[in-house]
Image (cartoon, rainbow, N blue to C red):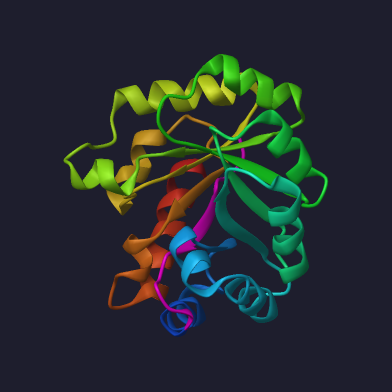
Amino acid sequence: MNTPNLQIALDNSSLDDALRTIKEAGSIVDIVEAGTILCLAEGMQAVKCLRALYPDKIVVADTKCADAGATVAKNCKDAGADWMTVICSATIATMKAAMKEIDELQVELYGDWTYEQAQQWLDAGISQVVYHQSRDALLAGETWGEKDLIKVKKLVDMGFKVSVTGGLKLETIKLFKGIDVYTFIAGRSITGTEDPAQAAKDFQDEIRRIWG
């Protein structure tokens, strides 16, 4: 079982705010992400800046693309992204079109997706999914629990590299002990702290403590 990656999600509403955070924590995390909010606010300029700052790290454009897969993926790739995301409700055709233009495609799991759909993604050559607790669900009072762990385990057993995100806190990480999580994606638990560098280090230390 590999040690999971740590990914920072930059869902700032301005590029200036995002860059202030990433300059503190970027050297500590494994993967840097231009979050959906940042992509919508600042476009591909955000991805270009992250690539310029971190030429040796994986850069993700969290577009949650639903259509025009090839065009969106080419824009992301041209800006310097290694990976991009598509929403799980996108058609297989959209996903396949995007795959031709980007190094890796991640399917974002929201709403009522099924394992039958997931098998279709695998059959299409997609190896990564992102398992979510949505921001709105968390604000409504939902928490991480056994129902989530069961789904993550099933996706791993199917053959996916599974990233986990959505209101992750340091104490959440231990819930996934024994599961081959590919990446933990943390946003506000790093970016919203007074010391993002220390917060990122605490996450890395906890991941390494559990997965060794």
Q: Is residue 193 above or below residue 53?
A: above
171 over 115 or under it: above or below: below
Numbered-mark total: 0
Left or right of 170 on screen, residue 67: right
Depth check: give the residue in front, 153 or 174.
153
- Residue 151, image x, y percentages: 44, 23
- Residue 21: x, y in percent? 43, 78
| Horizontal side, residue 33 vs residue 209: left or right | right
The residue sitting at the top extreme is 116
Q: Is residue 13 magenta?
A: yes
> Residue 197, percent across and down?
42, 75
Q: Residue at x 69, y 29 (%)?
A: 92
Q: Residue at the location (45% across, 77% down)?
A: 18
Q: Which quadrant would residue 111 be assigned to in this image?
A: top left
Q: Is residue 66 or residue 47 the one in the foreground?
A: 66
User: Viewed as shown, does residue 50 lie left or right of 211?
Assistant: right
Asked if the stretch drawn in magenta spans residue 152, the answer is no
Query: Where, by quadrant of the figure, is residue 47 drawn?
Result: bottom right
Task: Name the spot of residue 168 as percent of width and height, x first.
Answer: 34, 49
Instruction: Looking at the picture, tell me which residue is in the foreground, 120 or 58.
Output: 120
- Image: magenta residue range: 1-15
Q: Is residue 99 above or below residue 78?
A: above
